[in-house]
Image (spheres, helix red, strand yellow):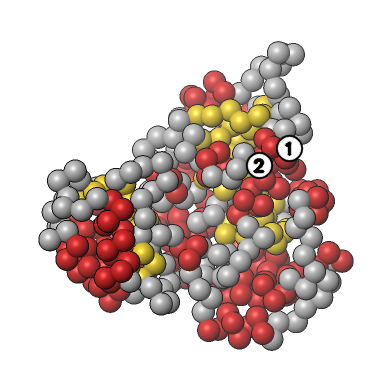
């Protein structure tokens, strides 16, 4: 990459192997179900997560809103975390497009929703209330630092869902980061879920796309929703070819990104005028605050890093002095050291 871009793992460029695979991908019309590369990606993705079938979609947001619209009807309710991507960063799509009412619960520092709060949020059968239909989790919980959620907790939520006849969706945009951090197969982290979406275009380095997985019956209905959202792609195997490399190879190297994030966090902790809790860096994501004592403003801090060292970061949305850095395939140990040296120089 031309810059050391730490704003997100969405900035990743496809690898040379991905570009070659895209150029040579067998293709067909995916709306007719005839694209062999898309079909292979969907099948392998579903198998990796222990589900029956998969659906290739254009983005994580499309995967999540497709799941929500498949599980819920208009005027029905989904329970979701206040810090969840589905609630904060998807343009209110489930409500705007599906008329789905979000019931918001606070997210705990460990990324979980309190189980008792979940139980209280489930509506009784009363004509004044929307019907509760869906519980949504996020793993890793990105907004609070890329925190991985354990299989044991997810099982507990799944038991609550089954007890009340509800469905459960996991926004697993970075589920393979969670699996790498916890040292367990990703399928164990999503076993109780009725549907799971995960992103190919974040740490897995593909240029575009996500996959939604679930039962055959669920995916059959989700395919209709995808079409209604304008997501019926044609010769999409060109994109799916990069996705196959993402799931086959890039999922196996995410521990490298986690190690680089820890190395970066430890280096930042030793620099004056920065406040960071190194213990919360568990995957490829870290947050830090630029203290009031810093010799530069937040805007100048970002600008000088970019202009003087080609390091790209920015204040986290909703904050003025908080920054997020996300490591990925293109952030090597050498680039971590270059970043730390640039930060030291700007704050000297």
Regarding mark 2 in the picture, which secondary structure is present there? helix
| Disc 1/disc 2 C-alpha distance (Å) | 7 Å
Q: Can residue 226 be seen?
A: yes
How many marks the image carries: the answer is 2
Q: Quick one: label 1 or label 2, which is nearer the N terminus?
A: 2
**Residue for badge 1:** 98
Residue at image point 50% right, 29% down: 105
Work out which quarter of the rendered image holds the N terminus and state it: bottom left
Residue at image point 76% right, 51% down: 229
Is residue 257 left or right of 300 when viewed as pictured? Answer: right
Residue 198 image-quadrant placement: bottom right
Relative depth, front residue between 300 and 13 = 300
Q: Is residue 69 above or below residue 279?
A: above
Q: Residue furthest right?
A: 32
Q: Are marks 1 and 2 in contact (CB under 8 Å)?
A: yes
Estimate the x, y position of residue 85 in percent, counting from the top left.
Answer: 53, 44
Q: Is residue 336 above or below residue 114?
A: below
**Residue for badge 2:** 93
Work out which quarter of the rendered image holds the C terminus and state it: bottom left
């Amino acid at each position: 990459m031309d810059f050391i871009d730490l704003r997100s793992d969405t900035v990743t460029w496809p690898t040379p192997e991905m570009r070659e695979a895209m150029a040579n991908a067998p293709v067909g019309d995916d709306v007719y179900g005839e694209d062999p590369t898309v079909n292979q990606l969907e099948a392998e993705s579903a198998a990796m997560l222990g589900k029956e079938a998969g659906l290739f979609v254009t983005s994580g947001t499309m995967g999540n809103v497709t799941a929500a619209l498949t599980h819920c009807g208009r005027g029905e309710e989904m329970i979701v975390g206040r810090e969840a991507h589905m609630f904060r960063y998807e343009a209110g799509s489930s409500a705007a497009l599906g008329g789905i009412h979000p019931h918001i619960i606070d997210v705990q520092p460990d990324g979980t929703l309190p189980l008792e709060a979940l139980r209280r949020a489930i509506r009784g059968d009363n004509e004044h209330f929307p019907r509760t239909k869906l519980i949504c989790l996020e793993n890793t919980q990105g907004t609070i630092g890329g925190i991985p959620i354990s299989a044991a907790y997810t099982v507990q939520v799944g038991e609550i869902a089954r007890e009340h006849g509800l469905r459960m969706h996991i926004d697993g945009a970075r589920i393979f980061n969670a699996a790498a951090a916890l040292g367990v197969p990703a399928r164990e982290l999503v076993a109780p879920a009725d549907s799971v979406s995960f992103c190919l275009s974040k740490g897995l380095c593909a240029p575009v796309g996500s996959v939604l997985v679930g039962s055959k019956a669920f995916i059959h209905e989700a395919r209709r929703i995808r079409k209604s959202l304008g997501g019926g792609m044609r010769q999409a195997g060109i994109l799916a070819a990069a996705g196959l490399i993402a799931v086959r190879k890039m999922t196996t190297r995410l521990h490298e990104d986690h190690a680089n994030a820890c190395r970066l966090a430890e280096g930042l902790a030793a620099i004056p005028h920065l406040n960071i809790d190194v213990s919360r860096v568990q995957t490829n994501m870290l947050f830090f605050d630029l203290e009031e004592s810093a010799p530069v403003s937040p805007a100048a801090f970002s600008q000088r890093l970019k202009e003087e060292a080609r390091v790209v970061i920015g204040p986290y949305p909703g904050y003025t002095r908080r920054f997020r850095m996300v490591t990925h395939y293109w952030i090597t140990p050498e680039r971590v050291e270059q970043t730390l040296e640039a930060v030291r120089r700007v704050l000297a």
